[in-house]
Image (spheres, rainbow, N blue to C red):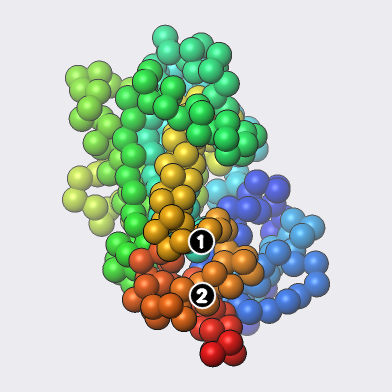
Amino acid sequence: MSTSVIKLSKNELQKVVDYYQPHALNKQVPYTQLVAKKGGTTITVYTSGKVMFQGNQAEAEANRWQSTTTPASSSGTLPKDFAQKSIIGSDEVGNGSYFGPLIVCAVYAETAILPTLKNLGVKDSKMLTDPQIRQLAPKIKEIVPFQLLTVTPEKYNQIQPQYNAVRMKVALHNQAIQLLLQKIAPTQPEGILIDQFTSEKNYRNYLRMEKNQVTEKLFFITKGEQYHLAVAAASILCRAHFLEELERASQEVGYNLPSGAGNKSDQVAAKLLKEGGLDLLAKYAKLHFANTEKAQKIAEKTL
């Protein structure tokens, strides 16, 4: 068994946590954010920013994140004045949340519209409150072409055994970009920036499985919202739509469905299980998350 340890920034660490959350183990380990097991590899995410991989595929899993963090160190991997170019940017929301859909959005922001987006207050959605995001979203939709794709929990559960988290996101980003290119045709963007969630090599490997592949002018960088307002706008539209969908689902069940994948999600999922079993839970939650097993145990204890 091999062991690999890497050190990541706070934002990069969150991407690791979101990615491995579906494989989380029911373990409480001091000074850790997450302990997960994917295949034969155990992943331990420490609050210090270190991530330890243990198992036969430890090095391969560690390399996945080392390769994605390299571009984030500098904007030198992007062409000169990239932030001022006419770009399609894409981002996703919901991958790390037990309840709610997975949403991907692509936005085309041409050079002439960038000052307007900036004046609106468009920036990294993590720097905005949810009310600010919901106020900004309709204004963004009025001034830029965009393409939103939504995978409901029901659909997610149907395709998840065939599509792992990365393959699913590759398929969605590719489709959103392709549909947006059709909308803006014959206009062509100067580049396409994807908020990086896996290595470019891995992205392109999964891309080969898709029927209609967008392969040209692709750029990948973590924290993409900081490099072009197209990605920032896409992240805001994603988050706003996710909040709307979660609110709608909450109204359907009659109580709040929380975002994220913490203990509160386990308790709410247990309540849904007692009301309608797995069939009901599958309408609102991503069943392959470790939360499902935790919720089943809670439901059994409270019968």
In terms of sequence position, does the residue under pointer 1 or pointer 2 come before the other? 1
State if disc 2 and disc 1 touch (CB < 8 Å): yes
Give, as a three-letter code, the residue at label 2: Lys
Q: Specify the quadrant of the image occupied by residue 6.
A: bottom right
Q: Residue at x 62, y 34 (%)?
A: 128
Q: Residue furthest front?
A: 254
Residue 190 visible? The answer is no
Q: Specify the quadrant of the image occupied by residue 4.
A: bottom right
- Is 220 rendered above or below residue 300? above
Q: Residue at x 25, y 30 (%)?
A: 181
For the N terminus, the quadrant is: bottom right
Tell me, for residue 255, which label it has, or none: 1
Identify the secondary structure beneath mark 2: helix
For the C terminus, the quadrant is: bottom right
Residue 234 % position (x, y): 44, 34
In this picture, residue 30 sits left or right of residue 120: right
Give, as a three-letter code, the residue at label 1: Tyr
Residue 31 % position (x, y): 80, 67
Q: Which residue is mark 2?
A: 271
- Is 199 rendered above or below residue 263? above
Residue 179 % position (x, y): 24, 36
Tell me, for residue 213, which label it has, or none: none
Identify the secondary structure beneath mark 1: loop
Residue 157 % position (x, y): 34, 68
Which one is nearer the viewer's eye here, 77 or 303?
A: 303
